[in-house]
Amino acid sequence: MSDVPTGPEIPRLDRRSFLRASALGTVLGGAALLSACGDGVRNPGVPPLPGGTVVADDRATWRIQGTPLLSADGSGRADGLTVAVTDLFAVQGQAVGAGNPAWLGQAEIQTTTAASVARLLSRGATVLGIAQTVDFGFGHSGVNAAYGTPPNPAAAGRIPGGATSGASTAVARGAVSVGLGPDTTGSVRIPAAYQGLYGFGPTHAAVSTDGLMPLSRTFDTVGWVCSDAATLAQVGDVLLPPVADADFGAAVTCPGLLAVADDRVQSAIRDALAKWKRSGLPTLTEEEFDIAPLPDWYDAIVAVQGYEAWQQYGGWVSTSTGSIGDEARANFLAASMVSESTYQRRLDEVRVAAQAVRDFLGSRVLLLPTAGSQAPPTTDDPGSVHVAAVLRTTGLLTSVATVAGLPTATVPVKTADGIPVGLSIVGPAGRDRDVLALAEQVAGTGIVAARQ
């Protein structure tokens, strides 16, 4: 894997002790950031590390910035690109903060740079800074209680989506051309959809995860978000393995999958699909796909990801519950209760589901909503039953590509009231570059929503 630290060696609590600690943490709330953190962490605004400075009035988006933070060390296809790296990747000379000040206060300085970041640098890109994320990247809201929640420039007053929240906000604001982050279970696709951007999650294992702080070895992958499809494909030219290009002959959409989304999203996607049929893009047909197992697939993904995350961080988390934000704490709480036998059973379910999706797709592309609803307002409690249900609906949709490890581009579409939600283009395994090329074609039609 990588040299990214997984935390200090701290004795693990048993599950019962963790449950008691979590219950207490919930009562005390997310403000109790210093519990079990040690005396050295007193302020989430950790002093700047060598090579960059914290922008105090924008620390919800950036953990650290430079001019640049890392310069290009080569030239090529990435010439001129500027990158925001999510705070889950190793960056030489910096620590991996993982969206958590307690973790950052104990993290080691990295001596190497993550493979994906290093490749971009070697092809001419520059890294302008390290962007904020949710705790450990373990959440889809983008809300961070310690540093603040990055704004959503495309939908003021609504959550940005996570875990690539800060990097997506930086792209949406025009501060950088590329936001790099994990797309483990939709953590690039969801913020891209919520912020009216183009996002891409590659075929599983197509891009090296060396130097990415692991969350789930089954699903971890490196994705990116951009403000236009041409840049999205440009990054793919750098990071993806070279393969011969080939056009898609057919596209398919499924009424059942569309019905998972709420009415406003359904209307926006139907409008986009109608324009697709008139656009000269690959022939689009409707075909039924059995969505009855979809909740089970989603639950299997959650269980597998949770078990693997707990195995990675349970020792640290079980002694530091008070320092973890509400969404990640709830996710770790659920993760702590997944037994090994349940994990193995759920892993088998993922494999069966993956084959079902791949068999259905064949050589076509699948079109479906990226998000099941508009981004919830920031005034909503991210730990509430309502927000959890909203994010679960989106999770049901992202799970189709996640469970099968398939390449997915999301392109911006908007609801009638102008709120972005996203249209996903899912392709067969290994045809990442073809999906990106198709996203460029879609961008040249009237399907995508214009940026304001």
Image (spheres, grey):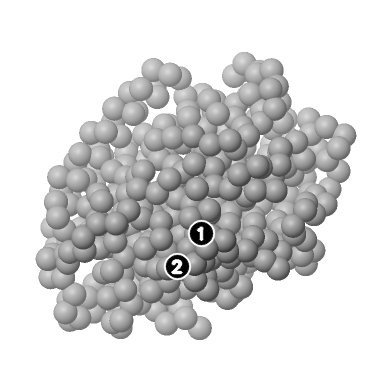
In front here: 380 or 289? 289
Q: Position of residue 250 (x, y in %)?
A: 13, 64
* Contact (Cβ within 8 Å) of mark 1 with mark 2: yes
In front here: 209 or 168? 209
Badge 1 density bin: few <14, some 14–19, many ≥20, Cα 10 Å: many
Tell me the tag on residue 122. Answer: 1
Q: Position of residue 356 (x, y in %)?
A: 19, 41
Residue under the image location 25 percent in, 63 percent down: 434
Residue under the image location 40 percent in, 24 percent down: 343
Kindly indicate the quadrant of the structure image that contains residue 129. bottom right
In front here: 42 or 430? 430
Circle 2 sits on which residue? 76
**Amino acid tagged 2:** Gly
Residue under the image location 54 percent in, 60 percent down: 121
Q: Position of residue 56 (x, y in %)?
A: 79, 63
**Amino acid tagged 1:** Ser
